[in-house]
Amino acid sequence: DGGSTDVQCFRPVYGGTFVRSNHLVEGARGPYGGETIFSWDAEEGVVTYTYWDTSGGTSRGTMIPTDTGLRAPDETYDTPDGSQMVISSRWTITSDESWQQVVEQLSGDARKTLWTIDYTRAPLSSGPRPELGGN
């Protein structure tokens, strides 16, 4: 909507075995944030992840490579009030310095785009951001 920013920080953890992502949404849709831990599942040949957010919601899913980036097929997001939502996302690499994320919700047989975000690589911050878990 142009009224919000979503800062994401990715870094290897536990000797590079996993990747941790923290994000913080500020502006019209914030404050809101979350953390994801990604890992490689060699047996299945996919990246698996678990996501936790500041509202208390969680989800677990997989990511598979595509010709243009990554795709996270349907996953169930568990909301803090106990309801569930089926969502999927596409991460499309748009340049060496940018990518786009499209998140959709499955409702019956129909898909609805919840949001589209264009990300641009930024310089590393000069210090930790506590709201992003110290990134």
Image: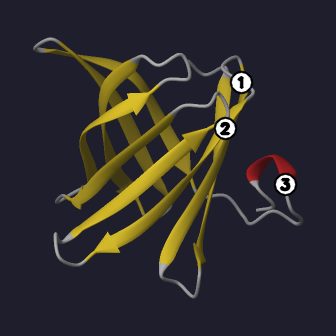
Residue 69 appears anywhere in the view: no
Which of the pair 42/73 is nearer the observer? Answer: 42
Mark 2 element type:
strand
Disc on res. 38: none
Type of the residue with mark 3: Arg
Mark 1 element type:
loop
* Label 2 – label 1 distance at C-alpha: 8 Å
- Mark 1, other Cα within 10 Å: few <14 / some 14–19 / many ≥20: few
**Percent x, y of residue 29:** 66, 20
Quadrant, the C terminus: bottom right
- Mark 2, other Cα within 10 Å: few <14 / some 14–19 / many ≥20: some
Asked which colour scheme the image uses, the reply is secondary structure
Q: Which residue is mark 2?
A: 33
Disc on res. 30: 1
**Furthest-right residue in view?**
127
Mark 3 element type:
loop
Q: Which residue is mark 3?
A: 129
- Establish if 94 lies above or below 24: below
Type of the residue with mark 1: Gly
